[in-house]
Amino acid sequence: MSKKIIYILLLLLFIAETVYCQTFTVSGTVIDGGNKMFLTGANVYLQENLNGASSDVDGFYSFKEKSGTYTLVCLFMGYDTVRQKIVLNKDLQVNFKLKEAAVAVEGVEIKVQREDKNVRSTQVGTIELPIKQIEKIPVMFGEKDIIKTIQLLPGIQAGGEGNNAFYVRGGGADQNLILIDGATVYNPSHAAGFFSVFNADVINSAEIIKGGMPPEYGGRMSSVLNITTLDGDMDSYKAKAGIGLLSSHAQVEGPIQRGKSSFNIAARRTYADVILRPFVNGSSMLKGLQCYFYDINGKLAFRLSENDNITASFYHGKDVFNFNSDLQTFSCNMNWQNTLGVIRWNHIFNKRLYLDVSANVTNYQLNVGGYEQAYNMTYSSAVTDYTGKADLTYSPDTNNAVKFGVSYTHHVFSPTALQVASGSTQFNTGDPQYYYARDIIGYVQHDLHVTPWLEVLYGLRYNYFAQTGPFTRYVIDNVFNMENVDSTYYKKGETVKAYNLFEPRINIRFQLAADKSIKASYTLNRQCLNLAALMDISLPTDIWLPSTDLLTPQLCHQFSTGYFQNFKDNTIETSFEVYYKKMKYMLDVNPDANIISIFQTNLDYGFISGTGQSYGMELFVNKTAGKFTGWVAYTLSWTTRNFDEIMNGETFYARYDRRHDVSIMLNYELNDKWDFSTVWVFSSGNAATIPNAFYIINGNMYIEYGEHNAWRMPDYHRLDISATWKIFDTKHLAGDLNFSVYNVYNRKNPYIVSYTVDRSSDSNIIKVKAYQISLFPVLPSVSFNMQFK
Amino acid sequence: MKNKINRAISRRLFSSGGVIVSSILIISVLMMFIITSCSQEIAIDTGEYTKRPVIEGYIENGSSPWVCLTYNQAFFTEINLDFTTPEGMSLLTELFITDATVFVSDGSTVDTLQFMIDPAILEGNYVWPPVKYQGNKIVGQVGGTYNLTVIIDDETYTAYTTITTPVIPDSIWLEYDKANEKYCWIHAMIQDNAATADYYNCFAKRLGRDNYFSECSNCLWDDTYFNGMAFEAIAYRGSSSLFSMDTVNAADDKFGAFTVGDTVQLKVVTMDEGSFRFWQSLLNSSVVHSNIDGDAIGVWCGYGAYYTEPVICVEKP
């Protein structure tokens, strides 16, 4: 009898344990209760154990938890936090409609439980930037710029004064994968790098991954900048407009069919040349100058059902730079443009399975013309991608989330199309060169919660990359003569060279406590697209080339680890990270190559391959809530390169090797009318190659250069401030004035060093002098922004 | 005289295929000009440099060979061109190599070049180079190959060059500046030989104004892009030598253009590949391809030269 009782008790205990251990799915969507737009990055979690998930670009979240009674919290910056009691004894679907947070009463700080992604995410080196934070940062000429903001983060360096190129952990500017709604942006710069192509009026979210890149991303070695654009308001019509000293912008959004579909259109246009025209006198160097850019973003969103959404987004931006003056013997023009379109469909099969399918086309094109009397040339370069991709997310239980996907891209590169004429002589510069490539991707990644304190995100990315015909491979005598001595023709679709590339990735998180964790990652990245820079500074004239039979795909091993801790209810995030990168098959221009003759043979003969390494540490302290917010970022790093053809293979510093890099961004909301912010940046000088001798030939001076990148430019530092005055904010209309001052203390930061030979007409003494050219002095600006609600 | 290096850089960029880079540079410079706040002189420690001889020698059809020997100089070296001063005199030994042995051979005759100093050096009105080694036994012949040997401090440097067949322009005419017809450029139509690889350059001298032929801008070409075609070369007036002590330019001269009233003689030259590669790399590449064997900078250059009849820059009809 007693045995039976024991058996029954054991059976009951087993059943109880089974019931107790049973897990269920909590899933749903998070949308803006006002405009019905999906909210990306909202944190949905259980208050009791902080288990949860962030909403993706479609507002969808999903996670697993053991049965029980919990408080489900949905939190998103700028919105009221929602708490909801749930009894988890079956799979639950909980959809959130968040209301925008009321304006804080002066002197009262609303404290809320903040998200803890900093310590809970497995990914090392990943930072999300809310658009509201981007909007507060002081900017040049009042133009908000996401890349200028990214350059303030640890491990990310600016290319130089006003330059939109960014360099992540010692990688090149071409090693950043820049995406708008999943489509690649090949040139993210307007005005030769002084502005970015991203219009802040339409940005929904921005995420930068600089280490521990999960397998779903690839094709670049250093980072991913993933930007999503806003869906239009599905409930009411809204508009924004802004007028600045150099540019204006406008944005309109609203429902096509209320609650079911929407549109969102935004445009910008600069008019610096028009503003300057009255100040340009008849003999000015600037006479005949035309310089502007414009861009247009558009997005259509359709909510077909609870489980199906379709979006179509497009972007077109163009820069125009013309110079044609009757005072000069030369004229020139240059324009470049990005155009891309994306169609996405996402479907929720069930609480465990989520599908995202998209197709996109992206095109980047450059045209240059130069004319000097009867001598003229035109030059163009382009890259076009056609991509189809599908990603499937499967979450079978609490401890597992699997994502896998495939994609196919057809690349068409036209790196050079050159026409030159001298008077009546039209030069035979050969046919335009085209390079075609197939790019097939397959990946799988598994996010595994091994124990409550150990999480592993691991996976494998496979990349089949093939250069295909039609293509003529020339054999040349040597890289200086570049004379074709033989050739092989590959017909359309024929494989010239194929690469099978496997890229393992792993991220590990050790949760030390609720507010602290240690993370580590190893990633192997391959890159089959290369940006060939003709000049030391990053310009739109840089040429994109695929990996070919001569150019092996670039390779990067990256190890990184870090300690992450949050303070004060996650309102202060801190991190300390170290990294080491070993890179192979990096590309540079062959110093020995004859660029004159290269247009008659294959362009890839003009490049050399080498290795590089980078290592360093990053500190980041970020206060995310309260009236006073901001961050301090510090990076200590070393970046070197080795090329057999440069300095006989000896190690030299990369151009963007910087020992110290500091960024401080502070924002203070004084009241509901005034908002102040400031940015201070400091960075060690860039490495540069400078002349160390001259010689005289034919009565002229010629330069001999010293060791490669052995000299350092002076240090760079700058202070910017900005104040925003919300002039009025009514039910239907809001307006603000933004005052900003760039380079407050007028620091003459180095842009380039130039040399002139000084010999006055009455002197017999010749002397070379070095001059530091600085671009921007103290620059105040004001812009007015208006919003129709 | 200022910005000589900049001009040299501009010139190199505008030669041949460098047009792309030149346009990029122009655009970049213009954009920088728009937003440039200032430039300030800075001091730079350039570090050590390797002292090397610079050999510059020429032979052309109808002329005897000559060679100028100098040393490269630290980048910020100050050069006093007044050789009547102690500083100028010291230049003679610091810049010029005066104790070398130089000889040229055509296979049968050896011409030992004699060291000589231009007497005008003391009057401050000389043409570069004021110091050179001059031959007198060998006169260049079209098709001839000439070997150069230079011995400096027991180090021997050798090179060879060939005088190629000169080319005679089919026609020459003027093009006037649209903005101001007071200025013009000279066009020359040249027929390239399809059967050979040909290399060209052009020099100009304003008779009565210039003391020497200066290299025209934008005229260094090989026939890669116009092999066998009639090629329209445009002679832009080259800049004066920085080191020549003559001032023949007028205040209203326009950079790169001739002025109505000038009488201009062109010197159209062809050269062999080794010579061309040196000049081309000097202008377009970061690695200079010398045709001299040994650790020296420079060129031993043979020119097949044709001197045109004087071209009078008349007013536009």
Image: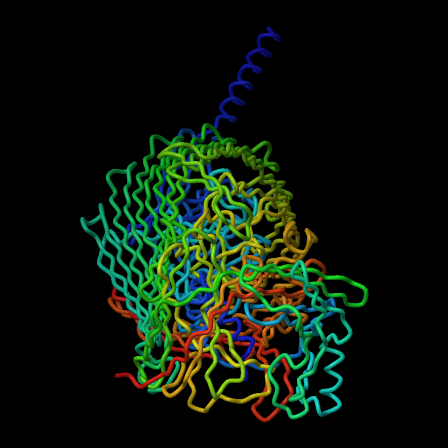
Q: Residue at x 56, y 64 (%)?
A: B141
Q: Is residue B316 above or below residue A190?
A: below
Q: Is residue A659 above or below residue A451?
A: below
In the displayed image of the protein, which residue is found farthest to the left? A257
In the displayed image of the protein, which residue is found farthest to the top? A1
Q: Is residue B92 above or below residue B149?
A: below
Query: Is A41 placed left or right of A649 in the picture?
Result: left
Q: Residue A649, position in %: x, y?
A: 68, 51
Specify the quadrant that holds the N terminus of chain B: bottom right
Q: How is the image coloured?
A: rainbow
Q: Residue A668, position in %: x, y?
A: 49, 70
Relative depth, front residue between B297 and A504? B297
Q: Residue B154, position in %: x, y?
A: 81, 64
Q: Is residue A218 visible?
A: no
Q: Residue A229, position in %: x, y?
A: 35, 53
Which image quarter: residue A640? bottom right
Specify the quadrant that holds the C terminus of chain B: bottom left
Which image quarter: residue A54? top left
Relative depth, front residue between B211 and A747? B211
Q: Is residue A555 above or below residue B18?
A: above
Relative depth, front residue between B311 and A728? B311
